[in-house]
Image: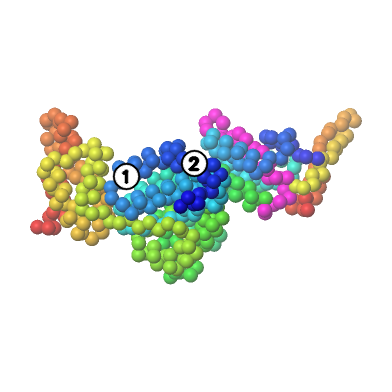
Amino acid sequence: MNTQTTPSTANGQSVDLSALLADSRVNEVLEELDAELIGLKPVKARIRDIAALLLVERARKQLGLIAGSPSLHMSFTGNPGTGKTTVALRMAQILHRLGYVRKGHLVAVTRDDLVGQYIGHTAPKTKEILKKAMGGVLFIDEAYYLYRPENERDYGQEAIEILLQVMENQRDDLVVIVAGYKDRMDTFFRSNPGLSSRIAHHLDFPDYARDELEQIAAKMLEQMQYRLSDSGRDALQEYIPLRMAQPHFANARSIRNALDRARLRQASRLFVHRGEPLSRDQLMTIEGEDLRASRIFADGK
Amino acid sequence: MKVTQGTFSFLPDLTDKEIRAQVEYALAQGWAISVEYTDDPHPRNYYWEMWGNPMFDLRDAAGAMTEVADCRKAHPQTYIRVNAFDSSRGFETTRLSFIVNRPANEPGFALKRQEVGGRQIQYTIESYAAQKPEGQRYE
């Protein structure tokens, strides 16, 4: 319709979102995120949404539209090794580029860093951490440990209350990200509705599929400057589904551990032939036998 | 009489925005911020009360500003100063120190003369406020 004009065009003012985007250089971080982190589609989509929101917010500010800064406290839930900490680190960078946080550093803490051991110890301890995190992102790993319903004298509740106060009143100063296993975080939020309602973004990190884990392994080896021989590649392809079926499978972390053990075996294999000169190629290659020596293959037979 | 101690003391009192900018500068230099208060304005009073521990590992001025605000709330009628400590080798000392809060009424100092041997005069100053016991000086 012709009559539909936005206030900005009516005033003859306009902003160029793509210029703002280029100006913030946030695209670089988003592209890095895409390239370096395999899978995690829903998480990446949400991060793009948040980036878009903050850019639009900036554009609105340029035209004098005030909405108050949006609440960006987040909750990351997912199984171990799904990339919660890595994404939190990236999130700090993104929020910094978008001008939402001033410094863009990440302070990663657990219950021990926030909760004290005796009466009057918790508040200063929590405040100390909050002060350090100001201007950046506070990442609370395994946040459900803060709340211990079985012990009514537990000081965790005190830490949560201080946290809530700062999350509400000093929204411009820091972003809080709580992280942990999905089911335990759900119970944690149920028993702390105040916290749940102050967290605007709940991001669920899905488990990696088999082919994603293969890509992750390839990426890790590339970063460590190793490569797989053909037999090594076959062995890894067999290894991953076997490891996935094992108890305590920790996604990317398990893969990293498996690769570390393979490096160990490669080293001792090379060490046996220590009389002969070693080529660069030999030092870089992980053979099938390095992986096949794993306990997991032995159990299968 | 306005007490002039530390950096910027001959300027008008700093606004919160200016204090924040100074703290940002100090943090950018890698200095640690601390907040102290006292109700004894004597220039040779080096030992002010500490308001919490010095803030090492601070990245943003917001943390220091909350401490300043808390200290003002708890001790509105005292002198409060912000110190920036440089731990780097060769300095290992306070590099910047300025007053961020002062009592509403500052009575100033009395000049005391003491006659000693040979009718010689020794001069000293004494704060009018410090004649009262600690904690009752600026009520």
Q: Amino acid at mark 2?
A: Val
Instruction: Report how far apart the C-alphas of labels 2 and 1 lie in the structure.
Output: 27 Å
Q: Is residue A57 visible?
A: yes
Residue B20 lies, with reference to residue A249, above or below; the image says above
Circle 2: element type: loop
CA neighbours of label 2 inside 10 A, class few (<14), some (14 to 19), many (20+):
some
Residue B79 in the magenta stretch? The answer is: yes
The residue segment tinted magenta is B73-102
Q: Which numbered circle lies on residue A15?
A: 2
Q: Residue at x 87, y 31 (%)?
A: B121
Circle 1: element type: helix
Q: Which numbered circle lies on residue A256?
A: none
- Direction left: furthest residue: A301
Q: Mark 1 highlights which residue?
A: A34
Residue B28, percent across and down? 53, 36
In which chain is the residue bearing label 1? A
A57 or A206: nearer the eye? A57
Q: Is residue A280 left or right of residue B135?
A: left
Q: Is residue B50 left or right of residue A221?
A: right
